[in-house]
Image (spheres, rainbow, N blue to C red):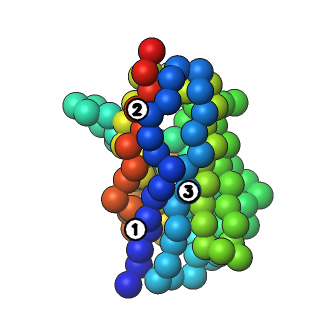
Amino acid sequence: QVQLVESGGGSVQAGGSLRLSCSASGFTFGSYAMGWFRQAPGKEREFVGTIDWSGTATQYGFSVKDRFTISRENAINTLYLQMDRLKPEETAVYYCAAGLAGEGGIVGGEYKHWGQGTQVTVSS
């Protein structure tokens, strides 16, 4: 049974940092791309970033580039999202997702398994 469990969410002031984690089980984590998405109330799901199976290639959404960093530790089946200089408009539920192949994309349909999400609240 595939499980993706996000953690590390919480409340932070604008300009602050948070590090999200996603613990994976039930599949060969090191063989698949992983992604982060977020969804704010009343808004569509937004691509945050993706990392390939090896951890050597990443791609970010335009609004988070240069502030967020995705990484992974295949040995412990864990994905990370380091978020720096957070903005109030980035308040959302953040989801990790497992890709369909070794390299991921920016569209949710390219991911086959999703976590339950973790809330991130950024206050001004």
Q: Which mark is residue 113?
A: 1
Q: Quadrant of the C terminus?
A: top left
Give the residue displayed 60% in from the left and 33% down from the top. 17
The answer to which of marks 3 and 1 sits earlier in the sequence is 3
Identify which residue is drawn at 41% across, 74% down.
3
Q: Secondary structure at mark 1?
A: strand
Q: Is residue 78 above or below residue 67?
A: below
Mark 2–mark 3 distance (CA, rounded to whole Å): 16 Å
Left or right placement of residue 59 versus residue 61 in this view:
right
Q: Position of residue 73 (x, y in %)?
A: 70, 66
Position in image of residue 96 (x %, y %): 47, 56
**Residue 37 spot, x, y in % from top left:** 44, 46
Q: Which residue is mark 3?
A: 21
Q: Amino acid at mark 1?
A: His
Residue visible at 51% across and 50% down in the picture: 8
Q: Amino acid at mark 3?
A: Ser
- The quarter of the image holding the N terminus is bottom left
Residue depicted at x 61% and y 54%:
80
Question: Dot 2: few (<14), some (14–19), or many (≥20) neighbours within 10 Å?
Answer: many
Residue for badge 2: 121
Q: Can see residue 46?
A: no
Give the mark count: 3
